[in-house]
Image (cartoon, rainbow, N blue to C red):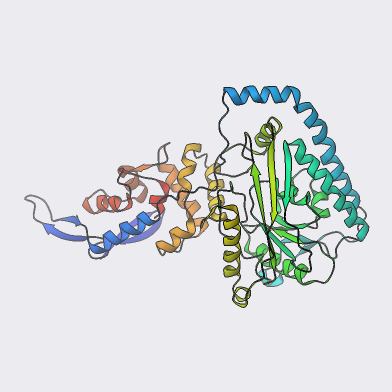
Amino acid sequence: MPFPIRFGGRRLDLCDTDDHAKSHQSSIPGDSAVLEMQPSENSLAVSERLRRVSTPETNPFINNTPPMCCNSITKAIFIGVFLLPLRLVLFGPSIAMAWILCAIATTCIPKPPKIVRDEEAGGGEEAVEDDVPLAPWRQKLVEYTAFWWRLWLYSLSYHNFQVVGTPAPREEARICVGNHTSFLDIFAMYACKRFMFVAKAEVRRIPFGWQIIRAGQTLLVDRCDKKSAASARVAIEKRVRCDHKWPTMVMFPEGTCTNGTALITFKSGAFNPGVAVQPVTISYGWDSVDPCKVYGGGPGVGGIIWRLFTSLGNTITVTFLDVYHPSEAEQRDPHLFAENVRNVMAKHLGVAVTNHSYGEVQLLLRARKLHVKGRVFPKLNLEMTNLQKILNADCSVDDFKYFLQRFHEVSGSDGLLDRDEFLQLMEMPENVITRGIFDIFDVDHTGSLDFKEFMS
């Protein structure tokens, strides 16, 4: 029979007896009958399913920069005295020259960028698109920025910049797909040749970045807005299939930055057109700072740039793999196409593939707004897709964020729920049944629940 509880004003029905536990009545003198929890085949199956969603070994949203120690501080001071002045002399002028070339290339363009609207998706501001490619002389100016971007990366201690393979001409592959590890990825690609990008709408907030965005004829998309994604698909299809001389389009199908230890789930946007793509891998060899900008912990962009300035030397390797031509089955199924390309890239990089997605990033951003302690962040490594699939749960990212807020309101600073806090949060009375429910969720038998066990 259903066992009703309430959670945040929502009614949840848990099943006892045959569904989660086998019970029997025992007579106790002077007391009413009590339900005694006994493990059943179904409850054991539930526990086994919960164990399968234990915390993944790989967490792609943690920056691996080691903490500062005496040796690293001494080295930073030494480099700061002897190399930093020279690097600053290169840093400012190189980015200024790249910006000036982009500004000239986009000045006095007759038509301003129009706002792409998808009437079927409901209209609204979705993505920024130029009607036609830049004129040849403007394209040539943008191509000259490659030298300055490479010099700019050199000033950030990336003395060794390697390009392996050859960018395919647009006639062979109109889309390049790459792994997204750092905010430096775009500049590393710009340092190879002239590309256009699909980027998150937030890049419009970068100071003096608009001219660079325009010069790259970048499509901007709101990753959290389904309408924006729908109209971006239309714009991508238009550019890919157009005979105008657009540059090759670069897309990062992961949709967010990771630390490079795994390739997370690929979005299908780059694969919906069903055309040949060229996989590109970007690898960073670093001395003292991991350049990835992730949301699960680690230095911010300013901290990363400062530690790059005081690093002895780092490397960037951009590898253009063979063009991948989709089969008929992959053309019909963009998700299959995306998965197969991801496997090719992961094999080349020697990393795992995981079912993490941008949903985890949204959860981490919500945790920051709730002022969740930094040491709790690793416990938010969920792999939502696996959680939903294994537990057969229909739970949206908004649901995850709501439950995180409720969990954080009750849990201690260690990010754990003990039995009393669990019952308080679930608004459940304490009895044999509710204690048994807690034991089912407590997969690791520690007497407390982390957020993943709670969500399961």
Q: Farthest residue toward the left?
A: 29
Asked whether, in this view, residue 424 is left or right of residue 166, the answer is left
In the rendered image, which quarter is residue 156 located in? top right
Residue 111: x %, y % from top left: 89, 61
Asked whether, in this view, residue 364 is left or right of residue 284, the answer is left
Residue 208 seen anywhere in this rendered image of the structure: no
Asked whether, in this view, residue 264 is left or right of residue 119, the answer is left
**Quadrant placement of the N terminus:** bottom left
Residue at the spot 70% in from the left edge and 45% down from the top edge? 184
Residue 339: x %, y % from top left: 57, 64
**Quadrant placement of the C terminus:** bottom left
Image height of 108 relative to 240, above or below: above
Residue 431: x %, y % from top left: 22, 50
Asked whether, in this view, residue 283 is left or right of residue 439, the answer is right
Q: How many marks?
A: 0
**Front residue (pair 107, 396):** 107
Residue at the spot 66% in from the left edge and 67% down from the top edge? 324
Image height of 310 relative to 42, above or below: above
**Front residue (pair 440, 34):** 440
Residue 88: x %, y % from top left: 79, 31
Residue at the spot 8% in from the left edge and 52% down from the top edge? 28
Residue 207 seen anywhere in this rendered image of the structure: yes
**Front residue (pair 455, 284):** 284
